[in-house]
Amino acid sequence: AQKITQTQPGMFVQEKEAVTLDCTYDTSDQSYGLFWYKQPSSGEMIFLIYQGSYDEQNATEGRYSLNFQKARKSANLVISASQLGDSAMYFCAMRSPYNNNDMRFGAGTRLTVKP
Amino acid sequence: DSGVTQTPKHLITATGQRVTLRCSPRSGDLSVYWYQQSLDQGLQFLIQYYNGEERAKGNILERFSAQQFPDLHSELNLSSLELGDSALYFCASSVAPGENEKLFFGSGTQLSVL
């Protein structure tokens, strides 16, 4: 079965520090895509970063990077230099042919940035 | 602005009623997805359409139905509403249903069933 696991319901980080949000996934597909989305309190879903299963380098987008460890089936999000505006829910997601390439989401991690 | 438009933003109705949620995808996107987000169930995939055809179903109840029209907009119909149907309903779109395609989400419809 395809499953996305985010084991941290809530995380705290001090402003300007880095934080890692964990994500593990389970799939038997060789080709799949991994995504992170941010959902602030306003409710919209904002795309942050994408990693393809065949990408050899970790994806980076500004202050966001994805620590992709394929053998361990993990795709952790690293946010560097945290800002107060980073306080939000963060969702890890996967698309794979097993699920008709539907995007399936983990339960999310609520990140709070402390001043 | 993601380019995905959902209406209405808020909907308050009573148990047993029927409502229709509307979604216009980003220009050029052929795939439309519906999700339900509730506190206890998280983000649940409901259904996917591609170029007017249903492509996949997720955890969609039989009381719920959807369609994608020739102009690619989509509607989600919820009938015989129950208290537990109260949730935030998202529509999302992508160019195609590939595993490397990111989804663009609308701002959601907050449904309250009283």
Image (cartoon, rainbow, N blue to C red):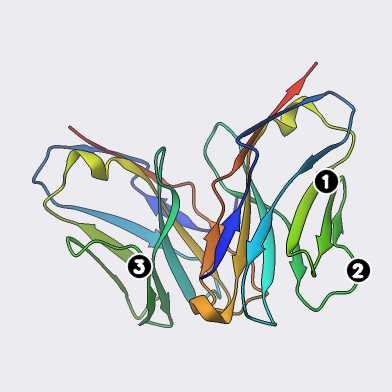
Whether residues under marks 1 and 2 lie with C-beta atoms below 8 angstroms apart, the answer is no
Circle 1 or circle 3, nearest the eye:
1
* Of pointers 1 and 2, the one earlier in the residue sequence: 2
- In the picture provided, is B80 more to the left or to the right than B90? left
**Whole-Å distance between the Cαs marked 1 and 3?**
35 Å
What secondary structure is marked by label 2? loop
Q: In this view, does A10 lie to the left or right of B16?
A: right
| Tag 3: amino acid | Ser
In the visual, does B107 lie left or right of B38?
right
Looking at the picture, which amino acid does disc 1 mark? Val
Q: Are marks 1 and 3 in contact (CB under 8 Å)?
A: no
Whole-Å distance between the Cαs marked 3 and 2?
37 Å
Q: Residue A27, percent across and down?
A: 61, 72
Which percent across, then down, holds residue A72? 77, 64
The residue located at (41%, 53%) in the rendering is B6
Is residue A20 among what the camera can see?
Answer: yes
| Residue type, numbered disc 2 | Gln
Disc 3 sits on a residue from what chain? Answer: B
Q: Give the number of the disc on residue A78.
A: 1
Residue A68 % position (x, y): 82, 62
Residues marked 3 and 2 touching at CB (< 8 Å): no
Q: Residues within 10 Å of mark 1 (few under 14, many from 20)?
A: some
Q: Residue at x 46, y 55 (%)?
A: B5
Residue marked by disc 2 = A57
